Image: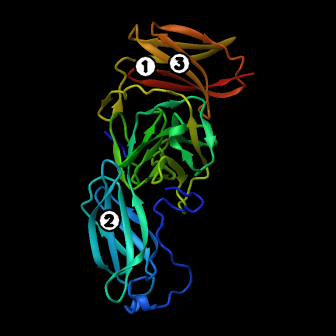
Amino acid sequence: MAQKNLLFGCFLAFFTVIGSLTAGGDVEMTPAQSGNSLFCDAPAPTDFQVTDRGQNFLTLGWTPAFPGALHTLLVFEMDTIGGWIQIFTHNAVPGNTYTIFNLPPGAYRAQIHTNCASGEASIYYGETFAKIVELTAVAHFPVNPTVMPSCDAIDYPEHEWVGFRVTEIETGRMNLFEYKYAIQKAIINRVFTPTRPIVAADDEGLFPIGSDVVTITGSEFSIFDFKTTPEIPVGVIEIFDASYPVIGICKKSGASWNANYLFEVLSAESTIPPGPPPPQTNGSATNANAFNLAIAERGGLEVTVSSDKTGETLKVGIYTTDGRCVQLVSLVSDNRTINISMDQLAPGFYFATVVSAEQSKTIKFIKHL
């Protein structure tokens, strides 16, 4: 059960006004606004964006071009091949906000035009986009990921794995999140679960466990750390992929970010595929085929893997705290101890992870001098 485009030099938020051609400063009434022109060229509203969202609604906000302006609002839904179908028109919207209800999960584009005195919509408009985000708990693990410039343009098809990492600076605890592109949605897959309490969630803290999927309307989501009760809010992440194949992953502009946590965008050229999510009982993980993992330093690194299911293929990986794989071994479970050389490892903290077809277990250890 669940618990709770692309010009990046120009983007300050995912829902960005891209159609407005007006300049800043005071706006005066023009002949177009008063209806004395052959066509309506009133300036577009500014700051057009999604201000709130829910499972079936979007609230849009903007700054009118002049006091008392009426607006024409158009909403389009993306079809399964990436085209846009107009689903909503309102020709006389007053004020600076409007909520659209009864929207099924999907990707949407909205346009806002200022109306002239004749009631005609201006040729200029503001535009904003909203996709959905699906959060899951099944992800590929990146091997030797590279840190990318935060909020930079990434050529998504050029990499085997794209995502990000959130790390608690003081302890080194971290989690990795895989980004997957889909036409109508963005998918964020959490790599470590359930042993890592840093999660991607909706704004109420709802996050996926096992095979659950948490769906969020709008391409932003929250990061929480559940190491304590109540959970610790970390910050908000935005996904920019309206100019796919170029995408971006950013901390939300204007939103607070917990200074105790580090956000890094990553790419990798090889991965370890995920296994099925662990079985769930009453919201808690159970070990149908339990195994234990123990670490000891005796010359090398002794990793003891004991399992109650023999003949099962296991992968044992040693990772740095920034997610870099320094050793990967495959073995067949038979309650064995394996020895991994630590000569190439600098002293410090590491993670050892054992992965089976059904579950994973991770422990933290220290290599001494």
State the residue position of label 3: 316
Q: Is residue 166 left or right of residue 345?
A: left
Mark 3 surroundings: few (<14), some (14-19) or many (≥20) residues within 10 A: many
Amino acid type of the residue that numbered disc 2 sits on in the rendered structure: Val
Secondary structure at badge 1 equals: loop
Q: Which residue in the protein does label 1 denote?
A: 356
Q: CA distance from mark 3 to mark 1?
A: 9 Å
Secondary structure, mark 3, is strand
Q: Residue shown at 49%/90% (left/top)?
A: 28
Q: Determine whether 219 is above or below 127 in the image.
A: above
Q: Do tag 3 and tag 1 residues touch (Cβ < 8 Å)? A: no
**Distance Cα–Cα, label 2 vs label 3:** 50 Å
Q: Is residue 242 shown to the viewer in this render?
A: yes
Residue 1 image position (x, y, % from top left)? 31, 39
Give the label, 2 or 3, closer to the camera.
2
Pick out the residue farthest to the left.
Answer: 102
Residue kind at label 1, given as amino acid type: Ser
Q: Is residue 171 visible?
A: no
Counting residues from the start of the chain, the first of labels 2 and 1 encountered is: 2
| Residue drawn at point x = 72 percent, y = 25 percent | 346
Q: CA distance from mark 2 to mark 1?
A: 46 Å
Tell me the quadrant of the picture where the C terminus can be found: top right
Q: Which mark is residue 75?
A: 2
Q: Residue at x 54, y 28 (%)?
A: 270
Q: Earlier in the sequence, mark 2 or mark 3?
A: 2
Q: Nearer the viewer, residue 309 or 170?
A: 309
Q: Is residue 301 placed above or below 19 in the rendered structure?
A: above
